[in-house]
Image (spheres, helix red, strand yellow):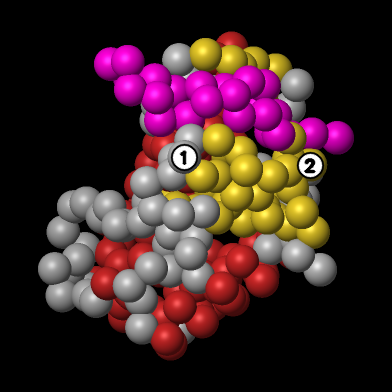
Amino acid sequence: MSIIELEQVGFCPQQTTILRDITFSVEKGDYVAISGPSGGGKSTLLKLIATLLTPSSGKIYFEDKIQGEYPITEYRRQVSYCFQQPQLFGETVADNLRFPFEIRQQEFDREQVYRLLKQVDLSKQFLDKSILEISGGERQRVALIRNLLFLPKVLLLDEVTVGLDEESKQIVQQLIRAVHQEGVTILQVSHDEEDLQQAKREIKIEGGRLVHGPISSQ
């Protein structure tokens, strides 16, 4: 069963073609890497699936229903997007990790947060850290945890390992593998060979077009 399906999707802001006639589907539980040269439209494609941009043509389906038929908040809880440059807010790590509970009007589950912090090699005390005092790798781990406190059905990853040191990259990749094993469908834009090998299959976007269909990496 397809969980995400794109049907002749195009994106042409101000008469400039960024993507054209993109058609492919993603099965529930799949792990798809999206590769291709810089400027080819990979990140734009992910943002269209995330509802951060609106297609100029074509249709995007989520669970056999047109994307635009979902209330945007409901959709984004099920199809979660992680930025290449993690966006943190407030003053502390705790401010960021309380947020998913607050928007759902649920009590902050400190033990769940501690478990996820441990999973990405961060201590309980890290909750009290100022977001101005943490490294890029730590920021990326916090942003990922924030997206995963309530597991989405689809996780969209936009070059989340780029610029990370080797230790942070390995920790992030391990977390992504663990989330996939829990049944979350993953679409990951990356140039990193380790990221590409981690995926079940790969699609390539070049010059705004799908160069070839999904190909098994195994």
- Amino acid, disc 1: Gly
Name the disc covering residue 75, or none: none
Q: Which mark is residue 27?
A: 2
Q: Amino acid at mark 2?
A: Glu
Q: Earlier in the sequence, mark 2 or mark 1?
A: 2
Report the quarter where the C terminus lies. Answer: bottom right
Q: Is residue 17 magenta?
A: yes
Q: Quadrant of residue 143?
A: bottom left
Q: Position of residue 209 (x, y in %)?
A: 55, 35
Q: Quadrant of residue 141?
A: bottom left
Residue 190 drawn above or below residue 210:
below
Residue 95: x, y in percent?
Answer: 27, 55
- For the residues bearing labels 2 and 1, Cβ distance under 8 angstroms: no
Q: Which residues are magenta?
A: 1-24
C-alpha separation, residue under disc 2 versus residue under disc 1: 25 Å
Q: Is residue 76 magenta?
A: no
